[in-house]
Image (cartoon, rainbow, N blue to C red):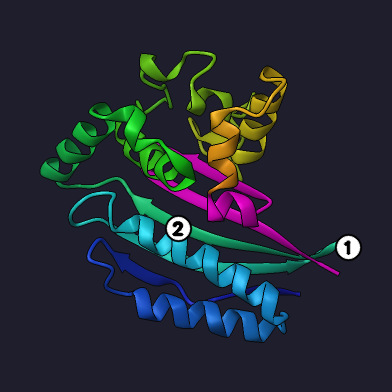
């Protein structure tokens, strides 16, 4: 069985927050999740809502939840989708934020999601990344898929995965690193099975996956 919640518009001033919380609550009830699993889905949703506040003034994103029965349990997804700003002023603001204080902006899982959405403004139509994001040890490059995967076969679509980033960190460091400690402190990284960020020239889509096991 597949369930999809209503799509809720979330603004940078957090208008729509109550509607999104209500959609997540109804989603949990329709799936019949336990109190603990419902709490985890709600915490992930709240984190995703809150990150919208700091992306940029006038930002609008669409948030919804999906679930699908699998042999292992119910695969849940909390999704946030945003279009590339049409306003030149908004685009300039995003470019400025993505360039300045880049290391500070990308701290934590929420910071990395924000930075990836801002980075979308720097993508070329062919999906090329800025040179400063191509270093092998850069957090963004470490999480990139080896192939330009796409659920919709879009040309130039890029996929960043928390699962791959975490795996790369583990391979490169024999002891716990600051980066791994940082992930452990993140609610989203701790509670989810994966975070996928799909980028194209026109859109950004964040997909947070959590498997509710049988």
Q: Residue at x 64, y 24 (%)?
A: 146
Residue 105 position by quadrant:
top left
Percent x, y of residue 56 = 22, 49
Dot 1 or dot 2, earlier in sequence: 1
Percent x, y of residue 193 = 69, 51
The reply, left or right, for residue 52 in relation to residue 147 is left
Q: Residue at x 45, y 72 (%)?
A: 7
85 above or below 133?
below
| Residue bearing mark 1 | 71
103 above or below 60?
above
* 188 in the magenta segment: yes
Percent x, y of residue 149 = 62, 34
The reply, left or right, for residue 125 in relation to residue 41 is left
Q: Is residue 201 visible?
A: no
What crowding class fits label 2: few (fewer than 14 Cα within 10 Å), some (14-19), or many (20 or more)?
many
Q: Residue at x 56, y 68 (%)?
A: 65
* Quarter placement of the C terminus: bottom right
């Amino acid at each position: 069985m597949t369930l999809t919640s209503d799509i809720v518009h979330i603004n940078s001033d957090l208008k729509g927050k109550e509607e999104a919380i209500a959609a997540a609550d109804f989603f949990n009830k329709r799936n019949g999740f336990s109190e603990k699993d419902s709490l985890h889905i709600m915490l992930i949703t709240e984190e995703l809502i809150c990150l919208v506040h700091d992306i940029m003034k006038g930002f609008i994103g669409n948030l919804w939840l999906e679930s699908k029965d699998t042999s292992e349990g119910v695969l849940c997804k909390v999704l946030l989708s945003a279009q590339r700003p049409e306003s030149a002023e908004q685009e300039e603001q995003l470019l400025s934020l993505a360039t300045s204080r880049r290391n500070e902006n990308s701290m934590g899982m929420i910071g990395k999601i924000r930075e990836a959405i801002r980075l979308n403004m720097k993508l070329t139509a062919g999906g090329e990344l800025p040179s400063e994001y191509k270093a092998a040890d850069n957090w963004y490059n470490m999480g990139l898929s080896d192939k330009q995967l796409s659920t919709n076969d879009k040309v130039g679509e890029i996929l960043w995965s928390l699962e791959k980033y975490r795996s790369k960190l583990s391979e490169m460091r024999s002891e716990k690193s600051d980066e791994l400690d940082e992930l452990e402190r993140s609610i989203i990284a701790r509670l989810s099975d994966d975070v996928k960020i799909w980028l194209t020239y026109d859109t950004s889509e964040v997909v947070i996956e959590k498997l509710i096991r049988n």
